[in-house]
Amino acid sequence: MSEFWLISAPGDKENLQALERMNTVTSKSNLSYNTKFTIPDFKVGTLDSLVGLSDELGKVDIFAESLIKRMAQSVVEVMEDAKGKVQENLLANGADLTSFVTHFEWDMAKYPAKQPLVSIADTLAKQLAQIETDLKSRTAAYNALKTNLENLEKKSTGNLFTRTLSDIVSKEDFVLDSEYLITLLVIVPKPSYIQWQKTYESLSDMVVPRSTKLIAEDNECGLFTVTLFRKVIDDFKTKAKENKFTVREFYYDEKEIKREREEMTRLLSDKKQQYGPLLRWLKVNFSEAFIAWIHVKALRVFVESVLRYGLPVNFQAVLLQPHKKSSTKRLREVLNSVFRHLDEVAAASILDASVEIPGLQLSNQDYFPYVYFHIDLGLLD
């Protein structure tokens, strides 16, 4: 499974024995894989400051998780035709995410443990905010380019009634620069080809004989040229419509056609040039954001453990990886049973949902006798 439970319990003899019991039961029942989660000794400060920091870290945690999910989705969108290789770009310090979490070590160089907790939290929050700012600007530029390219490509698809004709027609298909003559493009249903050939010269006066030519087809229709005198255009269009032939409005402009083709070439070139740098940026900064997120989780465990278990600081953090989704309920029951002594009233309400305690509103969704945080690595689910 791609989820972890990060818990902590007091570090005294009784609770270390409880942790051992938890490890024994979860191992024998094949409920989870458990490892110690090492957290440095931080400067605690005042309990009041920890209460405020607890709220702030909760917000940073939510923001960080949202950010890395958006970055993972951006990698998917950028890679397009190589989605099978997405996971290769979602790494943390060069390791897969599960390995990084299970072998987590606090980065003392980047986030010195001797600094006040508020300073460390502020550094993490600012780092994540800067990554989000850069993500927005970089992906916005790339997506705008991608949208423009897709819009141009859409013009080259579809049927003869809607698609661009600039990549179909050529200068030789038209009578150009004539004061009297003009070449029209007419869409003819395939079953009506013979009818068109027999009747187009008589749809109006002044149609040039043998001037029609089939220049393109789609599944249902063909695109024909026909040359006539300018002064009978309206009459020809009316008669053509009566016979279920459609005159496609089109003016051959060599400069415009050239501009459109150059625009497509430029957009393709720009997209190719931006692809590599953007993917590298996403790869590097996804790693940075993910690493910061797990550090936020570690800080939260420390702060909540001190607030829950008191001073002096003495607790043990453990990382649990449930083996199966179906076993999470049983795993939760084991943890609540093993650690119920930490909060007998709350544990009783969790283990027996039928017990109602006046003035106490608890559910196994939001309170546990032990410190608990969830880490979900299903970033692309």
Image (cartoon, rainbow, N blue to C red):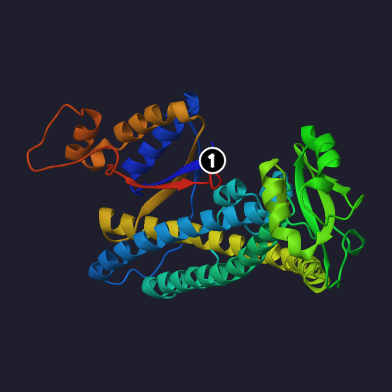
**Front position in the image: 337 or 222:** 222
Residue assigned mark 1: 2
Left or right of 305 in this view: 84:
right
In this view, the residue farthest toward the front is 205
The amino acid at mark 1 is Ser
Q: Is residue 171 above or below residue 38?
A: below
Closer-to-camera residue (330/258): 258
Of residues 247 and 200, the one nearer the viewer is 200
Instruction: Give the percent coordinates (x, y) of residue 214.
Output: 87, 46
Query: Does residue 196 appear to the left or right of 162 in the view shown?
Result: right
Q: Residue furthest top?
A: 29
Looking at the image, which residue is at 27% across and 53% down? 309
Residue 105 lies in what quarter of the image? Answer: bottom right
Q: Secondary structure at mark 1?
A: loop
Q: Is residue 334 above or below residue 342?
A: above
Quarter-of-image position of residue 277: bottom right
Please tell me how crowded label 1 is: few (under 14), some (14-19), or many (20+) other residues with Cα within 10 Å. Answer: some
User: Residue 350 appears in which quarter of the rendering?
Assistant: top left
Which residue is located at x 82 percent, y 37 percent?
193
